[in-house]
Amino acid sequence: MICYEEAVAIIRRCGEGRRLETESVALEAIAGRTCAQAVTAPMANQPFDNSAMDGYALHSAALEGATPETPVILDVIGRVVAGERTPEQSPLVDQCYEIMTGAPMPPNCDCVVPVENAELQGDKVVFFEGAESGRNVRLTGADFAADELILNTGTRLDLRHILPLATLGVSQVKVVRKPRVAVLSTGLEVIDDLDQPLQSGQIYNASAPYIRQMLPALGAEASFFGTVADEVSVFRDKLDEMIASGADILVTTGAVSAGVCDFIRRELEAKGAQIMFHKVKMRPGKPILFAKFPNGGPLFVGLPGNPVASAAGLRFFVYPLMRAMQGLPPEQPKHGVLKRGSNNKKAEFRMFLRAVSRHTDNTTREIEILPKQQSFMVSAFMAANAWAVAAEGVADIREGDLVDFYPFLPE
């Protein structure tokens, strides 16, 4: 067995050697993708000086000395509405424009007086106070300057990026292609049809629907190849299909331990795959296997069959591999104070524990480790929102200790 940090270093090294190519996608499809090219603003925002109010556009000097006792009266020489071209005529010192919100500022006008702060009398407007230059005017480039850097290569894109990019007229973004992941379950006892009554010795395939939902949430394009009932010849055929599918990563569940039915390692070696590691000092998921196929073939992650071990392997091996293939740095843990201790731990193992992460009143992150942590027990998933980490070399963790944790879904 090797330690977890060594295993992840191997995974990242292999993933970085299989970097994914780039593609351009529509703006609406960027959420969850990795930016593959720096993006600069193709225009300024605001793209032109415009009014922030419905009111009257004029030069501020025209209202010098205006008071309720000595109002200033200006002639209205036109109306400007949003969507119209900028007027060509500059108002004289005794003139102004009626203007709508978002309309372009007329030449030589440097402020807008809101309609409620003036009094319209026919084709004239009465002003009872002065106005400073720039008042109620949205200036060109106030939000983004033209050619300003707005996205760096490697930025993880999400929904919040869409509004600014659309405002700037960016319709396509170059991103890293999604990793293609092919998934296969194994096990004679595993039943995929959740509506089928279980017979003696059978269990439902809980890992498959979980993985089917988690992989897209982690940013992958997933395909599923069903379940093999511990039949080696069928597994060989399925393995050929998965390789031929063009997947970047192959993921299996089960058949990676040391029993008579755990055939995956020898079948991979028969195919010419290089075993990079098999068994890691961690719980759940100790029997995990990682291999790579020759000649640029896919990378392979064999997850243990117990459902919690599969979930932990997906989160802490498959996801780091995907990040490396997309050129992303390692995910960094968050930190919290342990509310409830766990002293049932072997020091040589790293443990990934289902936990609840919450903020306390003083904003300190508090971590509660849930009961029923065995790899076959799934009830803790009903409450958990995080994985707490008890590292190698630590015999137990106790209330008040600072612990690392990872959200169930990366943030």
Image (cartoon, grey):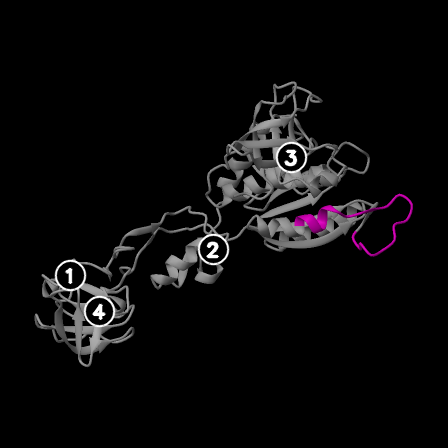
* SS state under label 4: strand
The residue singled out by tag 1 in the image is 130
Decide: few, some or many residues near mark 2? Use Cα within 10 Å; few <14, some 14-19, many ≥20.
few
The residue singled out by tag 4 in the image is 118
Look at label 4 and name its amino acid.
Ala
Instruction: Choose the circle earlier in sequence order: 3 or 1.
Output: 1
Q: Are marks 2 and 3 in contact (CB under 8 Å)?
A: no
- Residue extending farthest right: 200
Instruction: Choose the circle earlier in sequence order: 1 or 4.
Output: 4
- Is residue 191 one of those drawn in magenta? no
The span from disc 2 to disc 4 (Cα, nearest Å) is 42 Å
Q: Are marks 2 and 4 in contact (CB under 8 Å)?
A: no
Q: Are marks 4 and 3 in contact (CB under 8 Å)?
A: no
The span from disc 3 to disc 1 (Cα, nearest Å) is 62 Å
Look at label 1 and name its amino acid.
Gly
Magenta: main secondary structure = loop
Q: Are marks 1 and 4 in contact (CB under 8 Å)?
A: no
Of residues 284 and 9, the one drawn nearer to the viewer in this rendering:
284
The residue singled out by tag 3 in the image is 355
- Observer-side mark, 2 or 1, equals 1
Left or right of 305, for residue 6: left
Instruction: Choose the circle earlier in sequence order: 2 or 1.
Output: 1
* SS state under label 2: helix
Look at label 2 and name its amino acid.
Leu
- Residue extending farthest bottom: 122
Numbered circle sitting on residue 159: 2
Look at label 3 and name its amino acid.
Ala
User: Would you place residue 400 above or below residue 248 in this image?
Assistant: above
The magenta segment is: 192-211
Instruction: Choose the circle earlier in sequence order: 2 or 3.
Output: 2
